[in-house]
Amino acid sequence: MEETDLAYAAGLIDGEGSIGIYKTKYNRCHYGYHYRLLIQIGMCDAIATTWMYKNFSGNYGWYDRPGVSYQRMHRWQLNDKRASDLLVLLLPYLKTKKVQAEIAIEFQKGKRKSSDYPNNTKPLVLMEADAILAQRISALKRGKKLDTVTAADAG
């Protein structure tokens, strides 16, 4: 992949995308949930989102927003390790979401399948660490400074 393509993808994520760590229902996990990394881009124009899908795989779909005047929304998503691998490639080109990407990469590096733990019981301290990283990204999205995010915010 050319450098200009990576820069373009980073620009799409910086401008129209989001990077997040989300608490997701997961019945096979002892706690009934786990955390997942997700990057996505949503736009009315399908060209950029289909380009991301063709170049980086993932999921692509569209939906009609309610109301007569709204256009169809096209969405591309990539999750977990593939999302982290892409963020590693895009990191030198990201501007506004660079810190979010660094947190997401850190999160995914520490990720193991729940089946790697006895009885699918990931230690609670690791679940809490995942929650704190999720809260750090969420705080950045809301414009908070990271030094103001505490463990209490993760609850």
Image (tube, rainbow, N blue to C red):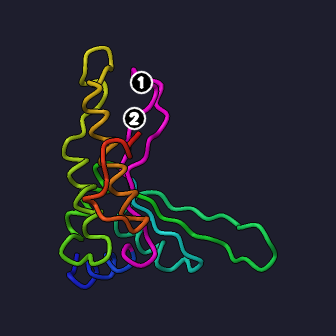
Q: Is residue 110 left or right of residue 68?
A: left
Label 2–label 1 contact, CB within 8 A: yes
Amino acid at the residue labelled 2: His
Find residue 45 and report its horizontal and vertical position in percent.
56, 80
Amino acid at the residue labelled 1: Tyr
Q: How many other residues sit within 10 Å of disc 1, few (<14), some (14-19) or many (≥20)?
A: some
Residue at screen point 28% across, 49% down:
81
Q: Is residue 15 left or right of residue 119?
A: right
Q: Is residue 145 on the magenta stretch?
A: no
**Region of the chain picked out in magenta, as a range:** 13-37
**Label 2 sits on residue:** 34
How many angstroms separate mark 2 from mark 1 (CA)? 8 Å
Q: How many other residues sit within 10 Å of disc 2, few (<14), some (14-19) or many (≥20)?
A: many
Residue at screen point 41% across, 24% down:
31
Res 31 label: 1
Q: Is residue 122 visible?
A: yes
